[in-house]
Image (cartoon, rainbow, N blue to C red):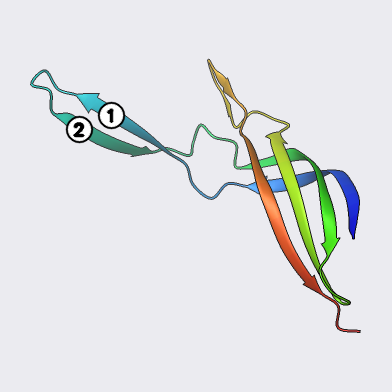
Amino acid sequence: VAAGLASLGVAGNVYLSSSVMGEIENPDGQVEHQRMDDSRSHRAVNLSAIGSVGAVYQLADRSFLQLEPTFLYNLFPVIDNDISCYLWSYGLNLTFYYALQ
């Protein structure tokens, strides 16, 4: 037995740190990796819009499996200098439920 579900919402985000990874190729062809930590130019707190559509499957009398593809998009730019940067992500939530009663 399956039931459909859809959800929309807003979530708060707190970014603890940020870094930029760079790759530089020297004239001799050697590749050098550099990491720069700089959270001064990043917004530490943000809000994201979340949307998902999925299904709940009843496996047995008291157990359920939920599959839910999810999309998340920042409402405000994380970086807002010469170039604005909005973070986004998508994924699949897989949840198992067992009813105790």
Query: Which label was assigned to residue 23?
Result: 1
The residue to which callout 2 is attached is 32
Give x and y (percent) for residue 86.
62, 28
Give x and y (percent) for residue 96.
74, 67
The reply, left or right, for residue 37 in relation to residue 27 is right
Q: Nearer the viewer, residue 87 or 67?
A: 67
Q: Nearer the viewer, residue 6 or 31?
A: 6
Q: Quadrant of residue 38?
A: top left
Q: Earlier in the sequence, mark 2 or mark 1?
A: 1
Residue at the left extreme?
A: 28
For the residue carrying disc 1, how many other residues have a C-alpha within 10 Å: few (<14), some (14-19), or many (20+)?
Answer: few
Q: Quadrant of residue 43?
A: top right
Query: Which residue is at 67% across, 48% downward?
Result: 92
Query: Which label was assigned to residue 54?
Result: none
The reply, left or right, for residue 10 in relation to residue 72 is right
Q: Are marks 2 and 1 in contact (CB under 8 Å)?
A: yes
- 57 w.r.t. 38: above or below: below
Q: Amino acid at mark 1?
A: Glu
The reply, left or right, for residue 20 in relation to residue 92 is left
